[in-house]
Image (spheres, rainbow, N blue to C red):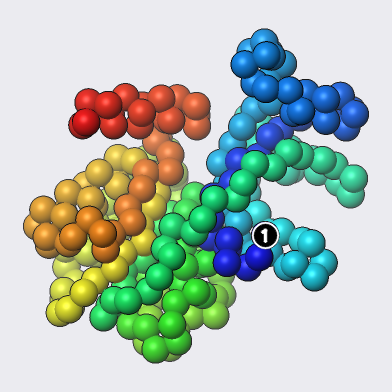
Amino acid sequence: MDASRQGAHCKLLLPQPEMSQEVFRQIISVRPSELSTEQRPVRRTYTVRNFRKKTMEMDIDFVDHGDEGPASSWARHATPGSFIGLLGPALPKIKEFYADWYLVAADMSALPLAAATIEAMPKDAKGVAILEITTVADKQSFDAPASLEINWMLHSDSHEPSTAQLSFLKEMDWPKGIVQTCIAGESGLIKQVRHYLTTEKDLPKKDTYISGYWKIGLVEDEHRTLKNNESKLAG
């Protein structure tokens, strides 16, 4: 793997509490279909924020949900020597940059994607980033193009729907030329943003990456099932 996979998603396989590394290796070497539901490792999707080939180090950002979520719990209690499984990563969401203007929007779940995309942009890129965070302490620094305007918004309760990003889009002066987007976050908001950009702003599908990463009230497995069902209905 190289730095070109920064911003790509990967699957983390989480060991059960108190499970030995030897037992975990044996489990992940077996096809999931050959394991009972109880034996299968929990899978969670994350984004590669950085990769340093020389030291074989990878950065993956976790949102701290306390010990209720399996991935959050693992990260909170991880110490030197802790282990985890990795599948992937896939290819980055944005593989080439060709637009006159760029639009990046993300909440905390997609902040690593937004950061990696911003840092991969040409240095003369122009556009706007709308980044919604839970607290001021969540604000980050990026190696961003000088002409990319970065807007930080606070939304302290992620269990409540937010409309701030959509309101920002509707109020801003829309640019001329080709607009390329990288947008991800809570599915309820994403549906509204997608409708606005593809219907009212008539952005071509090939120029837009817009994805629901999670949904209020659902864990990842439930959200994945919902998205699959919606895709079948749409097809």
Q: Where is 36 relative to 10, above or below?
A: above
Residue 224, quarter of the rendered image: top left
**To which residue does mark 1 refer?**
1
Tell me the residue at 21%/74% (across/down).
Answer: 178
Please name the residue shown 47% across and 68% down the image: 117
Badge 1 crowding class, 10 Å Cα cut-off, few under 14, some 14 to 19, many 20 or more, is: few
Q: Is residue 212 left or right of residue 197?
A: right
Residue 216 located left or right of residue 171 = right
Q: Which residue is located at x 47 percent, y 54 percent? A: 110
* Residue 26 image offset from top left, x and y in percent: 83, 25
Residue 137 in sight here: no
Give residue 68's quadrant in the image.
Answer: top right
Q: Quadrant of residue 66?
A: top right
Task: Say how many tags the image has.
Answer: 1
Q: Position of residue 42 (x, y in %)?
A: 65, 27
**Residue 154 point in image, percent of width and height:** 42, 59
Specify whether residue 76 is in view. Answer: yes
Q: Quadrant of the C terminus?
A: top left
Vertical position of residue 40 compared to residue 118: above or below: above
The residue that appears at 45% across and 51% down in the rendered structure is 156
